[in-house]
Amino acid sequence: MLKKIQVRDLRLGMYVQEICGSWMEHPFWKKSFDLTSEGDLRTLKTCGIRDVWIDTGKGLDVEGEAVVTAPEEEQHIEQELQLAVQNEPEPVQRVSLQQEILRARAALEQGKAAVVSMFGEVRMGNALKISDAGPLVDEISNSISRNPEAFLNLARLKNADNYTYLHSVAVCGLMIALGKQLGLSGSTLRSAGVAGLMHDVGKALIPDDVLNKPGKLTDEEFTVIKGHPRKGWEILNVSEGTNEIALDVCLHHHERVDGRGYPEKISGDELTLFARMGAVCDVYDALTSDRCYKKGWEPAEALRKMAEWRQGHFDERVFHAFVRAVGIYPTGTLVKLKSGHLAVVVEQTDKGLLTPIVKAFYSLKSNEPFTPQVVDLSQSQDAIANIEDPARWGFDLKQITGV
Ligand SMILES: [Fe+2]
Ligand SMILES: [Fe+2]
């Protein structure tokens, strides 16, 4: 059987039927071959080719959950992602990442402390006061207006210990960024942010050994985890100054548009805009974060996967707005430029989603790093050729971006 797979899922023993892309793009003169040489495997994984066709009748099949892509589907996804480009965001008064980073870090720390204390109160059986979160959410909202990347990037970097707390703060920031993109403002936007901050408050009542279990969950444990939206709703429902949007997002952020989510399996008109926003922001942050059982995906990779799943899972318009909010090449993405340089995306601009500001730091022609150079692609002849997997290269992108 022929299967189209990504090159990173290739392994020795497979039979390569065809390499995707023009033959000029890769150094293999042979069309089909047994993949038996380590050298060939290394070359395939580093020559910039994304996909290959393998014949599982003549060699090994993919292992585990490797993604098999169909060409039509892939094309469709690219088109969908490009759709987002047609609607450029409103220009806002921005400051640079460097100018915003300290304020963003302070807002993030404040947010984390607020969630830690919120979980503590819930565990002690105390009632929450929802209005207490207002000033903090405004602070986060202001930081995102000045420069969204500063806050959203910092909030993405978490470890297994602080995941649950920082995830809540990250989803708050993403709800605000997405809400602004969708034209929300004032108290509605603030409520969307509060809803993000509180969406997983029910997890305060889930035992730690289940919540942070490194291995695979048993069916029973998964049922316990699936109880958190309803537990959260019950907590917020008796909280002082409770808010409809927060109640809704808390109960429905794991619902899907096709009705196959949980806990109520609702779909169609029953799912509000806020529940749809919550589902997209929640999945994006979970995918891009390091967890106790897996390494987080790169933001651009996560967006592509979500684009593949979005039918049935997410609301299409909300998903497109989300892509516009975080960028087709979100900050922190490693890219190869047409000039043959590797670069990391450091900032979005209002000039377009395809032309962010990048920091170039490595030449593929000489195979050597150079002193990093900031390039605004909207003002440059250079352009992004493709996304690269940083795990393949082993660079410390955090050090390069300075976040
Ligand atoms: Fe959740
Ligand atoms: Fe969540």
Image (cartoon, rainbow, N blue to C red):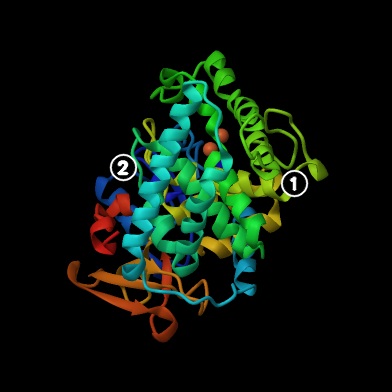
Residue 143, position as x, y percentages in the image: 45, 62
Say if residue 349 shows up in the picture.
yes
Quadrant of the image occupied by residue 27: bottom left
Distance (Cα) linking label 2 and label 1? 53 Å
Q: Is residue 51 visible?
A: no
Residue type at the position of mark 1: Thr
Can you say whether 39 is above or below 361 in the image? above
Instruction: Say if 284 sits above or below 350 in the image.
Output: above
Circle 2 or circle 1, nearest the eye: 1
Disc 1 designates what residue?
Answer: 272
* Residue at image coords 28%, 57%: 397
Residue drawn at x 62%, y 50% is 191
Q: Quadrant of the C terminus?
A: bottom left
What type is the residue that disc 2 sits on?
A: Thr
Q: Residue drawn 26% across and 62% down?
A: 402
Q: Residues within 10 Å of mark 1 (few under 14, many from 20)?
A: some
Location of the N terminus (image quadrant): top right
Residue 110 in picture, x, y percent from top left: 39, 47
Element type at marker 2?
loop
Towards the viewer: 292 or 102: 102
What's the residue at 58%, 26% (across, down)? 228
Q: Mark 2 points at which residue?
A: 36
